[in-house]
Image: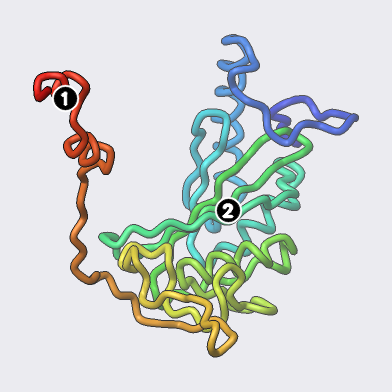
Amino acid sequence: PALGLLPPSTSCPAPYVSIGTFPDIQTRRMSMLLHKFSEQLMRAAPRAITSVKPQGWDLVATTTPKDLLPSLFFLKNSSMSQFHGLIDIVGADYPDRADRFELTYVLLSYQYKTRMLLRTTANETTIVPSAVDVFPSADWHEREVWDMYGIYFGGHPNLRRILTDYGFEGHPLRKDFPLTGYVETRYDATLGRIVYEPVELAQEYRDFSFNSPWTKIGEELPTAIESGKKE
């Protein structure tokens, strides 16, 4: 039978419930249910999902890129989980790791009001299978991850940039991407279009005067007392 982390609701349930809205007794009950659910999940899909552990009121699971699609399919269609919503795919870059990129698939179970974070890792040459066939909402999420990190999703129907323009070089959320970027854009009134130019950080010499103009005027004008002494 399905393990309901919270009783299924016949009305429209909230997709995520904050831990602060429940008293301590329900918090402990929720923690016990999450531990029980993680154990059942590991028994049901031991090869695809390498680990499952509770974290707060969320479940955090890990898998490999080759087992990503079977894991997502199981979590979506199994009666014990019913994670029917993929609301985000989050990327992170850890240059010191062998697999420097970490992908987190944020899943929601509307039936049981539970959130799961399914994580996998990749490097510059890893081809991560696209999840569009399992979750159509992954389309734009994967395009954003590709644009920002350069992680390639094999089988994506239209993998192109979504936030930067088509001539952009590099992937700006990588840790080795320079903060200033490689080029800057500006509007050229003569050409009547946007132009790309190399970034120039050097500036011409400028002599700044921090003296107040009112101070200078005060020094030039005599005060009333000084005028009286002179008379």
- Residue 140 located left or right of residue 53: right
Q: Residue furthest left?
A: 230
Residue designated by label 1: 227
Q: Which residue is mark 2?
A: 105
Residue 84 lies, with reference to residue 153, above or below; the image says: above
The residue at the point 21 percent across, 21 percent down is 224
Picture layout, residue 214 above or below residue 127: above
- Report helix, strand or loop for mark 2: strand
Instruction: Judge whether 23 appears above or below 6 on screen.
Output: above
Q: CA distance from mark 1 to mark 2?
A: 81 Å
Q: Residue at x 62, y 53 (%)?
A: 88
Q: Secondary structure at mark 1?
A: helix
> Of 209 and 70, which appears nearest the observer?
209
Q: Quadrant of the C terminus?
A: top left
Q: Type of residue at label 1?
A: Ser
Residue 70 % position (x, y): 63, 62
Given the image, on which type of amino acid does mark 2 rest? Tyr
Q: Position of residue 99 (x, y in %)?
A: 35, 65
Residue 101 appears in which quarter of the rendering? bottom left
Instruction: Please state which of the two labelled residues, at mark 1 or mark 2, is closer to the viewer.
Output: 1
Which residue is located at x 53 percent, y 78 percent? 187
Q: Is residue 1 something one can see in this rendering?
A: no
Q: Which mark is residue 123?
A: none
Binning the other alpha carbons within 10 Å of mark 2 as few (below 14), some (14 to 19) or many (20 upward) gives many
Label 1 Cα crowd, 10 Å radius (few <14 / some 14-19 / many 20+) = few
Q: Could you say where residue 175 lies in the image, as x and y percent from the top left?
A: 33, 62
